[in-house]
Amino acid sequence: MGHSPNPDDESNGLSPEQRLEPPNIRLIEPGITTIRDMETLRACVAYENANQQRMQVLRKLEEQARAIRS
């Protein structure tokens, strides 16, 4: 039947754009730290590479990838 929402799936339902281009720049880091799965993280890396290419954001995404793997 239906798939019950899991808070770890698609990490809170936020799109990469919502995480990486929030209305307040201070929300970028919390948007990244709430990523709990590699699929969402990869989508955010792809989005950042295709759009802003900010090294600071890409470093934070890399740190989060390490945290997810551990």
Image (cartoon, rainbow, N blue to C red):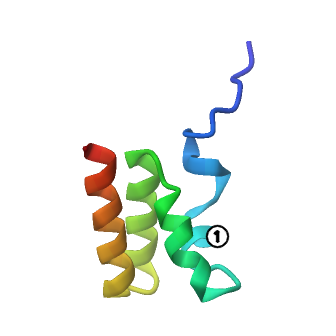
Q: Residues within 10 Å of mark 1 (few under 14, many from 20)?
A: some
Residue 26 image offset from top left, x and y in percent: 59, 84
Residue 68 image offset from top left, x and y in percent: 34, 47
- Horizontal relation, residue 19 to residue 68: left or right: right
Q: How many marks?
A: 1
Residue 31 image offset from top left, x and y in percent: 56, 67
Q: Secondary structure at mark 1?
A: helix
Question: Residue at coordinates 64% horizontally, 49% vertically from top-left?
Answer: 12
> Quick check: 44 above or below 8?
below
Residue 70 image offset from top left, x and y in percent: 25, 44
- Circle 1 residue: 18
- Residue at the extreme right: 2
Q: Nearer the viewer, residue 51 or 69?
A: 69
- Horizontal relation, residue 24 to residue 32: left or right: right
The quarter of the picture where residue 37 lies is top left
Looking at numbered disc 1 in the image, what kind of residue is underneath it?
Answer: Gln
Question: Residue at coordinates 71% horizontally, 84% vertically from top-left?
Answer: 23
Q: Nearer the viewer, residue 2 or 69?
A: 69
The quarter of the picture where residue 60 lies is bottom left
- Horizontal relation, residue 11 to residue 38: left or right: right
Question: Residue at coordinates 69% horizontally, 32% vertically from top-left?
Answer: 5
> Quick check: 14 above or below 27?
above
Question: Residue at coordinates 31% horizontally, 86% vertically from top-left?
Answer: 55
Tell me the quadrant of the picture where the N terminus can be found.
Answer: top right
- Residue at the extreme top: 1
